[in-house]
Amino acid sequence: MGEAKKCPRCTSGMHGMPRPRHLLVCGDSRDPQSWQRLLGAGGARPTVVFTSPPYASQRKYDEGSGFKPIPPDEYGDWWEAVQAGVRDVLAGDGSFFVNIKEHCEDGQRHLYVKRLVIRMVEAWGWRFVDELCWRDTKNGMPGTFPSRFKDAWEPIFHFSANKAIKFDAKRNASKTTNAFVYSSETHIELNDDGFQKGERRTFCDGMALPSNVLEIPSGGTGEHSAAFPVALPTFFVRAYSDPGDTIADPFMGSGSTAIAAAQEGRLSLGVEISPKYMDVIRRRLTRWLRAHNLAAGGGALDERTAQPAPQDAAAQP
């Protein structure tokens, strides 16, 4: 990929992994220069931005990165620069997915996430396309609470800048024996009395389209305190982008979004403020690319070492 630019935070360069190409920068996604460096290094505007940002005041991240937890009442002001950076780089037909859930205080849910969603639309002009439910099929963390049940799901908020976005639900379809062809005679609707009409249907083998409830078990890498499973961004990568498109994550964490992009034949851009987690991402990408007979490039990092791996040979098809 040519000579790498130096990363001012971890001094090891812009971490590029070509074919498919994955560009990472160690920096702050609230700083426009982080995105400019990625695009300047050859990155394309992303069609999908998927991220799980830091939750307000709830988790300790890498304290060596300089990141400080954000109080809930300050979260919207802190987030303004994040959404502005994403808006500036997102492709015209792109989508922005945010996985975040509010915590409880004094026996009730905090409202900072609800306020954030409203502000995304009313203050910053985003379209609020949908709210999806990720249900953890492991049924969440064990625990008992005096007035509520344990958490076993999280929302994923879908935003876009424009009405016309790239989307193909069939890419997440699954086989079923209960498929039927929609027509004016078989389409189910309610009559004036509230009863269904048009129920004459013939079932057959076919494909079922998914709903906006995702049944995916939780599970991370063990190297990050808040890692989500690769299957989560994969669902959105498939439906909202085409092979060869670029996927981005402004809080790359352990690199699950980049892995999802790689396995679906997409490119990726990532910003991560922590040098520690940059190493986690580079090791995961190096491991995945080599396992699939692809060159990891100048950003490769071997397991259990902070030293860059030797430059890989050209990838074999």
Image: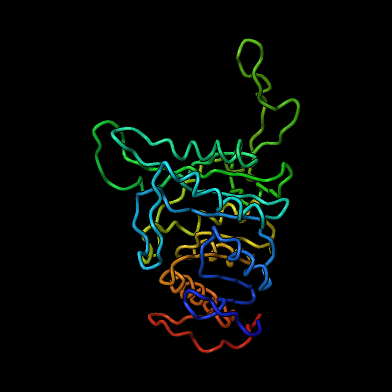
Task: Report the label total.
Answer: 0
Which residue is at a point 43% across and 53% down the rendered structure image?
A: 54
Q: Give the residue displayed 56% in from the left and 57% down from the top.
A: 234
Left or right of residue 148: residue 235 = right
Instruction: Name the spot of residue 192 as percent of width and height, x first.
Output: 66, 11
Q: Quadrant of the C terminus?
A: bottom right
- Residue at the image position 67 percent from the left and 55 percent from the top: 88
Residues 286 and 269: in front is: 269
**Residue 282 rendering spot, x and y as whole percentages:** 49, 74
* Among the 4 quarters of the image, the one containing residue 121: top right
- Please name the residue shown 50% across and 56% down the image: 231
For the N terminus, the image quarter is bottom right
- Expressed as whole percent of the image width and height from the top left, the position of residue 154 reads 44, 44
72 over 45 or under it: above or below: above
Which residue extends farthest top?
193
Residue 219 screen position, x and y as percent: 39, 57
Give residue 47's quadrant in the image: bottom right
187 vs 175, left or right, is: right
Direction from residue 140 to residue 169 in the image, left or right: right
Viewer-nearest residue: 309 or 12: 12
85 vs 163, nearest the viewer: 85
User: How did the renderer colour the structure?
Assistant: rainbow
